[in-house]
Image (spheres, rainbow, N blue to C red):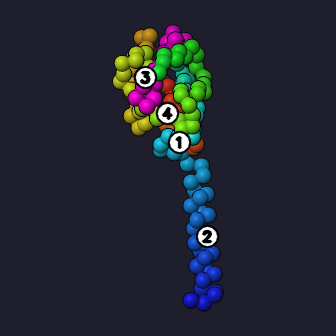
Amino acid sequence: MTRRKLLSTFIALFAMTLVTLMADAGSASAQQNPKCCTYTVNIQGVGADCFRVPFWILWDNTLVGPTVLTSNGVFNFQVPGNCPPAALFNGVSLGTPNGPFATYNHPVQFRVNGCCLVARITYDADGCVVIYIRPC
């Protein structure tokens, strides 16, 4: 193989690697990052009559809660236990510790204080858990 051909191959591989890294830089993760020691609850559009919204989370199959939300907003919490590594998020339940539990790609509707709320789970670009709570 000539130097020119070898250099061209190297440049092509470098360019493909660079394009791949740039494409992945802003995309959301589809799994939890064990180095992410915080999680976010984003509750919006919920009427005042619906509040005190308790929620329970299964972390490594251990139920933790309740944590009570008293207003709309974006709230950040620490993942329980020694972190890193972060405990594995298994699901969230609103209004009752008995489930059902919303999980990634499996939103669930809940009845809390007479209000219909839906919880949807995603992961942000860093792989941290984000729980969205909205009215049904």
Comparing labels 2 and 3, the label whose residue is closer to the camera: 3
Quarter of the image for residue 74 reads: top right
Magenta includes 54? Answer: yes
Label 2 to label 1, Cα distance in Å? Answer: 27 Å
N-terminal-most mark, 4 or 2: 2
* Amino acid at dot 1: Asn
Provide the residue designation for mark 1. 33
Label 3: few (<14), some or many (≥20) within 10 Å? some
Element marked by disc 1? loop
Residues 100 and 83: in front is 83
N-terminal-most mark, 1 or 4: 1
Provide the residue designation for mark 2. 14
Q: Which disc is residue 45 wearing?
A: none
Label 2: few (<14), some or many (≥20) within 10 Å? few
**Magenta region:** 48-63
Comparing labels 2 and 1, the label whose residue is closer to the camera: 1
Q: Position of residue 97 (x, y in %)?
A: 40, 17
Comparing labels 4 and 2, the label whose residue is closer to the camera: 4
